[in-house]
């Protein structure tokens, strides 16, 4: 199992946690898991070096604080394992220009980006393919938005295998059934995302600020607390978050809040979130207070990752004729 997350935002948000990172924590017990902070992907858009270095550490600290155990999973920083870029070059040479041009995420991102669009943004899915193939991952946890990239990864693995002999395993998408899709608190019809900051709950912001954001979440003009994503997107989103953070079913929450108002739900959810995030924040602060130790954890992770990645790359290089 391999998965990665970009360090660009510094703080992860509730959507990242409930939609992805919570599953990472669970999957480390059932799979041989490789988790990387993908700083190489981050520089597809301009980054301030100091901020990038800090955000990479902050990201790793959050993963550890959320429950990634470096003894049960291999946690590393992508740029620490040079095999990623080495295999990416090989895979670029196997990718058709037209094939890469069809990636819808590139079309979206390049259209949204005001600054000049770099070639790295274009070839990003090929680096992602290398990330996955180096570890011979059986499974990659993916959301809908990553499906096309995983298809490309499979096509490239297949193409390499056909041309040079069987070398890479074709990864399967791992769809996590109970993954929550979290919506923006201010616009509950669109996904909570760091690119639209108003309705985002960040794990590292002051929990008082989060509670306030939750209290002012957009809801409908009705009064009844029921789960109805079509008619009551805001309330339903709050119920999903509440349920995910407490492990209680949405039905039992609805039953509990019968006769109560939206204000009660929002106030309580603010408290639930604060209770969840307070120890996480304390652990993040602890990891960041000792960056030497944190860097050591990441160096050990990179060493373990390299042991696997270098074997795969050596085999691929040999097949190619290097
Ligand atoms: P963002 O949308 O804020 O840019 P990313 O694209 O970096 O976040 O997402 C990192 C991970 O978090 C991905 O696995 C993605 O599927 C998950 N994720 C992001 N936002 C949400 C959300 N609102 N609900 C559920 N999962 C999400
Ligand atoms: Na494991």
Image (cartoon, helix red, strand yellow):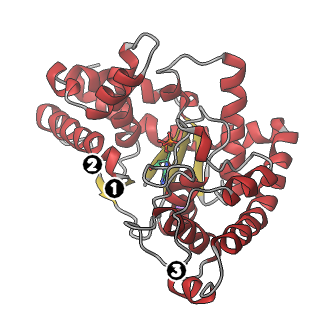
Say whether residue 156 is left or right of residue 140. Answer: left
Along the line of sight, the residue nearer the viewer: 271 or 97 = 271
Question: Where 301 falls versus 139 (above or below)?
Answer: above
Tell me the CA gap for discs 1 and 3. Answer: 33 Å
For this orientation, the residue located farthest to the left is: 162
Task: Name the residue at 88% across, 41% down.
Answer: 289
**Residue annotated with mark 1:** 138
- Give the quarter of the figure containing the N terminus: bottom left
Question: Where 298 falls versus 217 (above or below)?
Answer: above
Using the rendered image of the protein, determine whether residue 317 is visible from the camera's viewpoint. no
**Residue annotated with mark 2:** 169
Using the rendered image of the protein, determine whether residue 203 is visible from the camera's viewpoint. yes
- Give the quarter of the figure containing the C terminus: top left
N-term mark: 2 or 3: 2
Along the line of sight, the residue nearer the viewer: 182 or 7 = 182
Tell me the CA gap for discs 1 and 2. Answer: 7 Å
Say whether residue 255 is left or right of residue 163. Answer: right
Q: Residues within 10 Å of mark 2 (few under 14, many from 20)?
A: some
Q: Position of residue 244 (x, y in %)?
A: 57, 70
Location of residue 283 (image quadrant): bottom right
**Residue annotated with mark 3:** 250
N-term mark: 1 or 3: 1
Q: Tell me the number on the disc at residue 23.
A: none
Say whether marks 1 and 2 touch (CB < 8 Å).
yes
N-term mark: 1 or 2: 1
Ligand 1 near label 3 (Cβ, under 8 Å)? Answer: no
Label 2's element?
loop
Q: Position of residue 49 (x, y in %)?
A: 67, 17
Say whether residue 2 is left or right of residue 213. Answer: left
């Amino acid at each position: 199992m391999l998965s990665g997350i970009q360090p660009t935002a510094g703080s992860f948000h509730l959507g990242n946690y409930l939609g992805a990172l919570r599953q990472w924590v669970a999957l480390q017990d059932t799979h041989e898991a490789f988790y990387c902070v993908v700083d190489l992907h981050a520089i597809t858009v301009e980054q301030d070096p100091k901020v990038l270095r800090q955000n990479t550490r902050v990201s790793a600290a959050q993963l550890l604080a959320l429950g990634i155990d470096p003894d049960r999973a291999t946690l590393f920083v992508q740029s620490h394992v040079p095999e990623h870029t080495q295999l990416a070059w090989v895979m670029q040479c196997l990718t058709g220009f037209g094939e890469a041009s069809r990636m819808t995420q590139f079309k979206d991102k390049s259209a949204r980006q005001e600054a000049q669009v770099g070639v790295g943004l274009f070839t990003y899915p090929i680096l992602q393919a290398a990330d996955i193939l180096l570890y011979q991952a059986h499974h990659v946890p993916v959301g809908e938005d990553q499906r096309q990239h995983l298809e490309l990864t499979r096509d490239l693995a297949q193409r390499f295998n056909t041309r040079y002999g069987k070398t890479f395993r074709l990864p399967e998408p791992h769809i996590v059934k109970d993954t929550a899709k979290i919506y923006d608190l201010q616009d509950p019809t669109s996904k909570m995302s760091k690119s639209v900051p108003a309705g985002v709950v960040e794990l590292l912001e002051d929990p008082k600020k989060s509670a306030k954001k939750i209290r002012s979440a957009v809801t409908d003009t009705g009064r009844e607390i029921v789960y109805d994503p079509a008619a009551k997107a805001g309330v339903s989103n709050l119920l999903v978050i509440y349920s995910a953070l407490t492990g209680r079913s949405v039905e039992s929450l609805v039953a509990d809040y019968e006769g109560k108002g939206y204000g009660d739900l929002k106030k309580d959810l603010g408290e639930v979130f604060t209770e969840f995030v307070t120890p996480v924040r304390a652990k993040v602060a602890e990891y960041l207070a000792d960056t030497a130790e944190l860097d050591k954890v990441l160096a050990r992770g990179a060493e373990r990752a390299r042991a696997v990645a270098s074997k795969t790359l050596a085999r691929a290089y040999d097949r190619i004729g290097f």
